[in-house]
Amino acid sequence: MPHSIPSAPAGTETESGLNAKASPKAPKTFFRPCELRGKSILQKIAGVRDEGGFAMMRHPLSQPRPNRMSSPHPLRMIHAPSVEADAPPAASPQAASRRASRKSVGWREAFFRAAGPGVVTGITMGAWLRLLAQNRFRIHPAYWPKAAFTTLASGLSSTFAVAEKAIYGRRIAATVVPPPLFVLGHWRSGTTHLHNLLAIDERFGSPSFSEVTIPSTFLTGSPVLNTAARFLLPATRFEIDNVSLSINAPSEEEFALAQMTFHSPYMGWAFPEHADYYGRYVNFRGVPEHEVAEWKAAFLTFLKKLTLRHHKP
């Protein structure tokens, strides 16, 4: 894993698309108010929304917004300098409704927006420091509370991770994974609903929200970490939709793989300045073989842990 995301002089092309110069006529932006309709899958996965809850950094070519320091984006970790861009399109009724609902959120939602670690919730200390190094430790002051909470939580996660490896390491390695059932689909196409329906079938084991957010520690740390999550977790996915949210809700394993390997487009939510770099992992085209091998090994380990816990395919 590289110590930092590779960079190139402005205006040059790179494999990941980092530092590619945007056209002055069509400036590139990930966070201007707009509908998801008509956007590329990379932009959708990397975080097109004007609001959200995962990021720690603002895309350098995103639209400037008033009072951004007083209202940090709940999914980001870093701001980057804004540049002038074309005027955003008029806000849709759906966007206006979302903004109105955000003005009346409870304290849990407010905490999640201000200090919640988002996609790196259960990351261990070592992995967190490597991720920060990969992004050159660029945390804007508006997101220091997020970084501080993540750092504090990562210390606890590391303790449970060491215990889990000592207690379950051999059993995990010896576990045989039965053929899994995968749900594949486009963003916002109903895959969450289908996943929830399949999870009701007792023949299948499904990764829960708890398991995908603490993938390195859920065999040992669940009792303690789930207690904290019940107290802090919002009732719904309030920055995305009104689907209910709980520690036992079925969730996609991509969140776990994002933490375990960083080889995920979801890391572009936390570090949108490097969304193009992390966007390579949508289809893994041009990704080095050793990173593909790391991703496969992490996925197999996660499936083995789920099988060990649920004893189901």
Image (cartoon, rainbow, N blue to C red):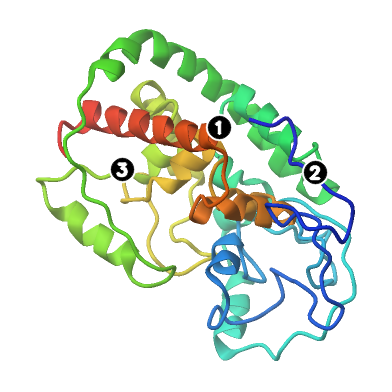
Q: What is the three-letter code of the residue carrying label 1?
A: Ile
Is 36 on the left or on the right of 229, as rendered?
right
Is 277 on the left or on the right of 310, as rendered?
right
Q: Earlier in the sequence, mark 3 or mark 2?
A: 2
> Dot 2 lies on which element?
loop
Q: Residue at left 51%, top 50%?
A: 284
> Dot 1 lies on which element?
loop
Residue 73 on image: x %, y %: 70, 59
Mark 2 Cα shell of 10 Å, populated few (<14), some (14-19), many (≥20): many
Q: Is residue 90 above or below residue 8?
A: below
Q: Residue at left 45%, top 31%?
A: 225
Q: What is the three-letter code of the residue carrying label 2?
A: Ile
Mark 1 Cα shell of 10 Å, populated few (<14), some (14-19), many (≥20): many
Q: Is residue 76 above or below residue 205?
A: below
Judge whether residue 264 can be spotted in this image: yes
> Dot 3 lies on which element?
loop
Q: Residue at left 21%, top 31%?
A: 177
Q: Is residue 97 above or below residue 122?
A: below
Q: Could you say which quadrant of the image residue 139 lies in? A: top right
Residue 143 on image: x %, y %: 76, 48
**Residue beneath disc 1:** 123
Does the residue at mark 3 contact the one at mark 2 (Cβ under 8 Å)?
Answer: no
Q: Residue at left 75%, top 40%?
A: 135
Q: Earlier in the sequence, mark 1 or mark 3?
A: 1
**Quick one: quadrant of the N terminus?**
top right
**Residue beneath disc 2:** 139
**Residue beneath disc 3:** 207
Q: CA distance from mark 2 to mark 1?
A: 17 Å
Q: CA distance from mark 1 to mark 3?
A: 17 Å
Mark 3 Cα shell of 10 Å, populated few (<14), some (14-19), many (≥20): many
Residue 113 on image: x %, y %: 64, 55
